[in-house]
Amino acid sequence: MQVGRRSFLAGLTAPILLGSSGCTTSRLLADGDRTPLVRTRYGPVVGKIDQGSLAFKGIPYGAPTSGRGRFMPPSPPQPWDTPFRAFDYGPMAPQTDPQEALESVAADARESEDCLTLNVWTPALDDNRKRPVMVWLHGGGLWRLSSAGDSQAGAHLAAHSDVVMVSPNHRLNVLAHAYLDEYDPAFAGSSSAGMLDLVLALEWVRDNIEEFGGDPDNVTIFGQSGGGQKVSFLMAMPAAAGLFHKAIIQSGPAPLALEKPYGRELSARLLTLLDIPTNRVRDIQEVPLAAIMRAYYQIFEEVGGFGVMGVIQDFAPVVDDVALPQHPFWNGASPLSRDIPLMIGCTRTEMTEYFLASNPDAAKRDFATVTAQLEPIFGTQAPAVVAHYRVTHPQASPWEVDALIRSDWPTRLFTQRIADEQVKLGGAPVWMYRMDWETTARDGLLMSPHAIDIPFVLDTVGTEPVEPGQLGEQQRMMQQMNSAWVSFARNGNPQNKYIPPWQPYNSASRPTMIFNLHSHMANDPDGSDLAFLKKDLANLEVVAGGVTNPLEREKSL
């Protein structure tokens, strides 16, 4: 007999409901907190009231991934009996360069290989409701950050929109994506270990979320930047099939993974730096973590670090015929996700903040300098690319032209590629958007930068500084975008009363919702720009190591 479904501490039977009247019932613990308890499949967890919602932070969903668990598929946690105090975020995955940590007293001590925890926010318990579940996958590429932080907390989303939000931590960088399969079959799928962590988190949602007032049959995965890349990969992973029902990719399209030769090259370099023979690859599970992270950062520097954001060149999932049988979208969308409604989009000028950070005088450049600095991406075609954008955007400054090019390549181009491939399946609808609202930060130079839309979606406007005079505008953007995301999570359609009619995407007219203070639909906005870039696509680096034609791959097998 199952005990304690949607239950609280000892004998409470009335529901906890949060709203204008506050919490109607709870149990006082020794510290005086009004603290709800939920019995998960693995053990009881106690949470806290958080801005109108009930928050449960740092819940273990997986066993330790250090030692013999390193580079291996995750496994469920050991059950516990004593109520777990889910009051704080769990540790983030290791991501600090040990060399830099030695030089900085600000190094984060909350990093741990044993990082498989997740957070849950719900508006109520024990009220016999099944709410949409929105699983937020954090950004930071595939190598850094975590689910913690006020700007991506789920308290407001749960309290104001009557949904349950979940956000997991998981393994990152080399610990998540080292391709060791060919050295030892015990490491099969190791290049997708971090993604398999997310599969385990989704299995936890399936098995436990009903206890938190959520509907396990209505789960949306969504994420921005690296979170969007993770959504892309999950849509092509057999292990994730059936664990989610809708997907949203925000400013993080990943139509491509790495292929085996490049994955092998990265892992061979890792083993060399660690002085591990290829016939003793299991020794890597006993190497001090600091040595692995130092080797990782040396490789990261050798391959060019960030490179072109959006073009994967670091440790990442490999098309390995095990965990990831195909590129997510490059040679066609996976039939696994044929019936998954997809919403996908980006901001108008994705890279402005990052480029200004490394080039403080970037806005003062002339067109000749802009062209020269685009040559590492476009080679001899850089002058033609700049000339095209000057024609299609005649009022744009050199800074804006550069910003548009760096946003289109590759983010908007990859976004369009994914949408086009997904609609070819002829299944669930695709919804395309672009976020054009501009911030006045940095004297307006940022325009519509990467990540500006996170608080609009998660209902967290005000958790970070807002430019003078723009609070009302941000709240207007939040009203539109948050409503669209929540509506999509409810029924697969983002339509809501705050935006004009939104037509599903098709590859002929490419209807796109342009989010702004006065949002509107546009067919194939700035489509000639993407069409121009696609003409030379075969000569551009779309992923490190290149892409093998599927027919050539079949011949080589």
Image: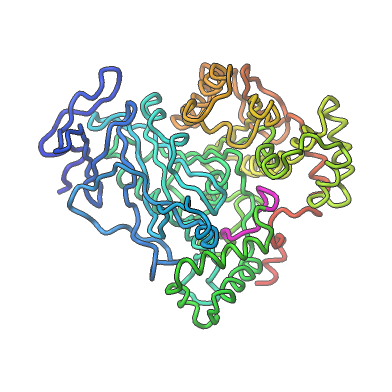
- The residue sitting at 80% across, 52% down in the picture is 376
Q: Nearer the viewer, residue 305 or 122?
A: 305
Q: What is the quadrant of residue 134 in the picture?
A: top left
Residue 517 appears left or right of 555: left
Q: Nearer the viewer, residue 298 or 165?
A: 298
Residue reaching furthest left? 11
Q: Position of residue 157 (x, y in %)?
A: 41, 29
Please say whether residue 315 is one of the residues in the magenta stretch. Answer: yes
- Assign the magenta stretch its main secondary structure: loop
| Magenta residue span | 307-317
- The residue sitting at 51% across, 20% down in the picture is 479
- The residue sitting at 20% across, 32% down in the picture is 34
Q: What is the quadrant of residue 398 in the picture?
A: top right
Q: Nearer the viewer, residue 513 or 458?
A: 458
**69 vs 516: above or below:** below
Q: Position of residue 233 (x, y in %)?
A: 55, 51
Residue 511 appears left or right of 233: right
